[in-house]
Amino acid sequence: MSSSTFNPDLKDDADVQLNADGSLRHLLTLKGLSKDILIELLDSAEAFLSPEGALPVRSKALNGRTIANLFFEPSTRTRASFDLAGKRLGADVLNLDVNTSSRKKGESILDTIYTLEAMQVDIMVVRDAGAGVPAYIARNAKDFVSVLNAGESDVSHPTQGLLDILTMRQYRQDFENMTVAIVGDIQHSRVARSAAHGLETLGIGELRLVSPPAMAPAADDMPFAKLVDNLDDGLRDADVVMALRIQRERIGNLDGIPGIDEYFANFGISRERMKLAKPTAIVMHPGPMNRGIEIEGIVADSPQSVITKQVTNGVAVRMAVLERVMRTLDAR
Amino acid sequence: MSSSTFNPDLKDDADVQLNADGSLRHLLTLKGLSKDILIELLDSAEAFLSPEGALPVRSKALNGRTIANLFFEPSTRTRASFDLAGKRLGADVLNLDVNTSSRKKGESILDTIYTLEAMQVDIMVVRDAGAGVPAYIARNAKDFVSVLNAGESDVSHPTQGLLDILTMRQYRQDFENMTVAIVGDIQHSRVARSAAHGLETLGIGELRLVSPPAMAPAADDMPFAKLVDNLDDGLRDADVVMALRIQRERIGNLDGIPGIDEYFANFGISRERMKLAKPTAIVMHPGPMNRGIEIEGIVADSPQSVITKQVTNGVAVRMAVLERVMRTLDAR
Amino acid sequence: MSSSTFNPDLKDDADVQLNADGSLRHLLTLKGLSKDILIELLDSAEAFLSPEGALPVRSKALNGRTIANLFFEPSTRTRASFDLAGKRLGADVLNLDVNTSSRKKGESILDTIYTLEAMQVDIMVVRDAGAGVPAYIARNAKDFVSVLNAGESDVSHPTQGLLDILTMRQYRQDFENMTVAIVGDIQHSRVARSAAHGLETLGIGELRLVSPPAMAPAADDMPFAKLVDNLDDGLRDADVVMALRIQRERIGNLDGIPGIDEYFANFGISRERMKLAKPTAIVMHPGPMNRGIEIEGIVADSPQSVITKQVTNGVAVRMAVLERVMRTLDAR
């Protein structure tokens, strides 16, 4: 039981997540993840999809294995998605309810991890409000354990990024000629960051990050993307339009952050606004949606919407990632 | 993703729950459910029973299938019963903790349903405090999804009704010569309503709804039943006596609602009072019991009590319903 | 459904937990449990261990069986341990969240038990803050049901005691020549009591219970042990040093109970202090740890620490107990 200091800069997350031979050991971030690994995961996820209404694809790849869902931040859909992904691969899934307050009065996060390792948990799926926590855990994990980031502060949400990119590829395929507009509170969005990092690696034609100035990222955060503060400019001729969930508690309460009505008027994805995008454009949202705030209900329910397809892809992507890191562990 | 207006009167629940060929697709209410379907479910449930102390009956009918328990109202026993019923049929069971407050600030109920459909959930077991919610979900569900009502406001609790009726049949068989007395807050009881609707269809000899006047149902609510405001009259020569759980928060706090002692004195099922019923009468209670309020402890523990038998029947009935709707889905 | 009075003295727990033929039917306490049964459980647990990093041992001993985790006190690690133990034996595991407040307004504890029996639960794993509750349940359980104590007030935590003893045996084997020092709030520790009772039966060489006077047990509580109020005396030449978790809410708030800094200075297991024990001594802790209060972090992470080994042994011990009582039930 040795512990390194909790210092996210100690080593790049991108390096921590790979074994010496370059195989995927943990999944912490899409930043710096190679095109080969991205494509391998996307292709593998495709194989875990079945037609709508058909039985879900199952496998025995994780038979006898144990997955712990360690969510320090509440989540219904991401946890359910990992839960089903694990079960459909034959794993035992342990759902641990650990909120931040219980962690405060209880043991340190590393002691929790050592405990789960000692219970012979193979894969830990971690969601945490603290930046650097998943990598910190990964750095301290035994060599027979894998750590998957299921949402980390504003920083990273790699399985969400993968499912978003898989959905774009299904409807467009060619990233080089694709224009993607992500709209909302970019500054605080791990969803936007993970999609952006994956799309950069895959050579996205144009990535527009569209937000009010107060919600824009720092200029050097995602330098390959184009920062846009006007929705019309952001949507024009876009192939993909992704609306981000607005945290209601931020709306109208902060300097420069508009109220709900103003937000919808200026940055809501409405049917009217969608006419600026390509007629064949798809509309995405990571969920859960605030209809009438960041997206008009009629758009979410329109044929352009691929929002439920994203959810289906989410289970498949998580199966692909679980199966991939398990193979890495098995190859020890 | 299309949505109809949330209007419970749009179409009768009794119609929504059947496919065009009359097969059971959802289970929303026992009101209007045909005698044939009722008998089929009761007979099927019998086959899922094993002798006390023996291994529970298992089947592979739902192997590879996914059930989501979506409880917007807290419940321990009904959820546990559905959980075990699903597992004993081989299904993966997803337990979702969704309280009403989180629903308020989160996504709409239909978006939750669309998300579960997209995760390839086959059967959604829904408990909700809002009248009309299960039917609303059923009307908007994809054709490869089934919705089961696990408790809906004061309106309906069909699997509870089935397990109550199964229990009565096991001890009496002949509904036409049976006198059933349901005692308690009939006005607010989904348990009483579901039992009543099923018993009406099966041609119950006499159904007495016994309560203080302030807890009586409207005259046109269950017109086939006899409203009785005196416990002695209600119990006289009854074959079946079912005490309903009293919501303690209602006791003594509302106009015309007696206090606890007064309630027990006038409407509690005591050993003394049970002498009015047939000597062979059975005593039922949906649980959890308030001993000393609606039922005397000694009665609950007496040989006349079939309260634990109801619980056993509950798992069997839920297995029967799950297996039945799954066959309907498979026949698409 | 019959119920005896809730009187822990009605019959000794040690007798309640055995069948007439002496086989283990429930596990309530290590007090009075025979050496033969202790050794059988320890040996069986060894067989459920696999090398670190290898697949966990699985068995089909509980295929088709149902375990209910009924935790009236919150617990993450003990519940997770029982959960995994049950799943790795092939059982269906029902996790019930029942806090004391919901029990207060809800049904009686026996009615909860009758309900689970009626759902064909085979083994109930009970944690409760009330002394006597597990035995009370066991006395009232049907003859096809087994009750396992997963933590009972200050009184008993038998699977913890077994895992502690198993760990000591792995590193020392010979109990007669072993000196064990348990350090902390002995008076309120079910962990200390269970370890002590098992060690007494196994003929421990010397057992020292080390605490500030205000945390010492009554003289007649564990008369075979030596009460020590000075840490140096307690640690000298010890083979095994076990630090107990300190309840932070007790620290500094009670007469005679020292504050945190004072506690660590006088009773914290520090690297400096460990020099008094044998050089080969092992350090144990039941978890979760308060590093810097009852144990210095550097000690917990040192090669002497067997704390994670305890966790691994915990799953194995619980598998052994589950498998053992199931065999007793099967032999009915």
Image (tube, coloured by chain):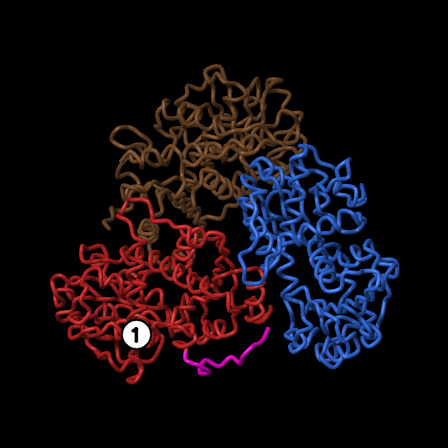
Chain colours: A red, B brown, C blue
Q: Amino acid at mark 1?
A: His
| Viewport quadrant of the N terminus of chain C | top right
Residue B250 position, x and y percent, is 53, 43
Q: How many marks?
A: 1
Residue B113 is at least partly visible in this image: yes
Residue nearest the observer in this picture, A77 or B249: A77
Residue A53 position, x and y percent, is 28, 44
Residue C116 higher or lower than C208, as above or below: above
Q: Residue at x 78, y 55 (%)?
A: C198
Q: Is residue C133 left or right of residue B220?
A: right
Residue B179 higher or lower than C303, as above or below: above
Query: Is A315 one of the magenta-colored residues?
Result: no
Residue B252 is at least partly visible in this image: no
Residue A62 position, x and y percent, is 44, 54
**Region of the chain picked out in magenta, as a range:** A1-12
Determine the main secondary structure of the stretch shown in magenta: loop
* Label 1 chain ID: A
Q: Is residue A296 left or right of residue C307?
A: left
Q: Is residue A130 left or right of residue A120?
A: left
Residue nearest the observer in this picture, A93 or A281: A93
| Residue located beneath label 1 in the image | A197
